[in-house]
């Protein structure tokens, strides 16, 4: 049963610390998405990749957030330095050009104190 | 700019009652609309898409281009329908989705 995996599942850190979240897309999928979920904003797209190339990261605060795909099996989202307002659940999803469904990971719940 | 609006953050209905979760969108092109659902302690998952014109778990949604709406409906709510529901829009030729803010549905026994 192929699934998107994310690590860590929970992260508590102090303001100013670096946070790295990892995602393993489903094997064979060529699109990867990062979303942030908050009560107020719902699901916001932060960045997405197609064939490992970043296509849109306009939803991401550029001064502190960065997203990369070092290889086809790993996507990372990094926050440096983290701030309390970054506290949220971060979801990774993967998909394919062949169909229009996105498959979501379990999310990383981030708390920045 | 494209946008998806779900006007209700919270919606409670009694078991057996009809339920309608509202979704409106703004997009001048040909939209592709989806409903995603997140049950408690589960992943966000696709519920249905307008192009399939299917009924999933008793839910249906019709794309109304005149009213730019894609409301999700079920004639008789069940307790297991309690979840967070997100409406999503995909633009022409794009891979990414624009999500609404979500509606938390609670079905009261």
Image (tube, coloured by chain):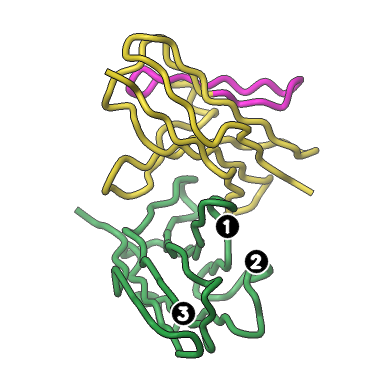
Chain colours: A green, B yellow
Circle 1 marks a residue in which chain? A
Q: Are marks 2 and 3 in contact (CB under 8 Å)?
A: no
Q: Which residue position is annotated with label 3?
A: A69
A71 relative to B29, above or below: below
Q: Quadrant of the C terminus of chain B?
A: top left
Which mark sits nearer the N-terminus, 2 or 3?
2
Determine whether the residue tagged by mark 1 lies in a helix, strand or loop.
Answer: strand
The one nearer the camera, A73 or B25, is: B25
Which mark sits nearer the N-terminus, 1 or 3?
1
Residue at (43%, 84%) from the top-left corner? A19
Q: Is residue B26 left or right of residue B11?
A: right
In the rendered image, residues at marks 2 and 3 fall on the same chain: yes
Q: Are marks 1 and 2 in contact (CB under 8 Å)?
A: yes
Q: Which mark is residue B49?
A: none
Residue at (32%, 40%) from the top-left corner? B39
Which numbered disc, 1 or 3, marks the residue closer to the eye? 1
Q: Which residue position is annotated with label 2?
A: A59
The spot of residue A14 in percent (x, y) is 42, 85
Q: Residues within 10 Å of mark 1 (few under 14, many from 20)?
A: many
Which quarter of the picture shows residue B8?
top right
Cα gap from disc 1 to disc 2, whole angstroms? 7 Å
Q: Which residue position is annotated with label 1?
A: A44
The one nearer the camera, B11 or A29, is: B11
User: What segment carries the magenta color?
Assistant: B55-71
Determine whether the residue tagged by mark 2 lies in a helix, strand or loop.
Answer: loop
Residue at (32%, 14%) from the top-left corner? B15
Residue B62 forms part of the magenta stretch: yes
């Amino acid at each position: 049963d192929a699934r998107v995996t994310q690590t860590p599942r929970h992260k508590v850190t102090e303001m100013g610390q670096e946070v790295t979240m990892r995602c393993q897309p489903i094997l064979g999928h060529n699109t990867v998405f990062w979303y942030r979920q908050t009560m107020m904003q719902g699901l916001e797209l932060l960045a997405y990749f197609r064939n490992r190339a970043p296509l849109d990261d306009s939803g991401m605060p550029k001064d502190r957030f960065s997203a990369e795909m070092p290889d086809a099996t790993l996507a990372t989202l990094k926050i440096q330095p983290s701030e309390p307002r970054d506290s949220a659940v971060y979801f990774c999803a993967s998909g394919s050009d062949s169909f229009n469904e996105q498959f979501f990971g379990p999310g990383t719940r981030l708390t920045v104190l | 700019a494209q946008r998806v609006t779900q006007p209700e953050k919270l919606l409670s209905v009694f078991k057996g009652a009809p339920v309608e979760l509202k979704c409106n969108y703004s997009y001048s092109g040909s939209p592709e609309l989806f409903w995603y659902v997140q049950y408690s302690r589960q992943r966000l998952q696709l519920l249905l898409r307008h192009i399939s014109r299917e009924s999933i778990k008793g839910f249906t949604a019709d794309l109304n281009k005149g009213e730019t709406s894609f409301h999700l409906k079920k004639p008789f709510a069940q307790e297991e329908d309690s979840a967070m529901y997100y409406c999503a829009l995909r633009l022409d030729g794009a891979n990414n989705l624009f999500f609404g803010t979500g509606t938390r549905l609670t079905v009261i026994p």
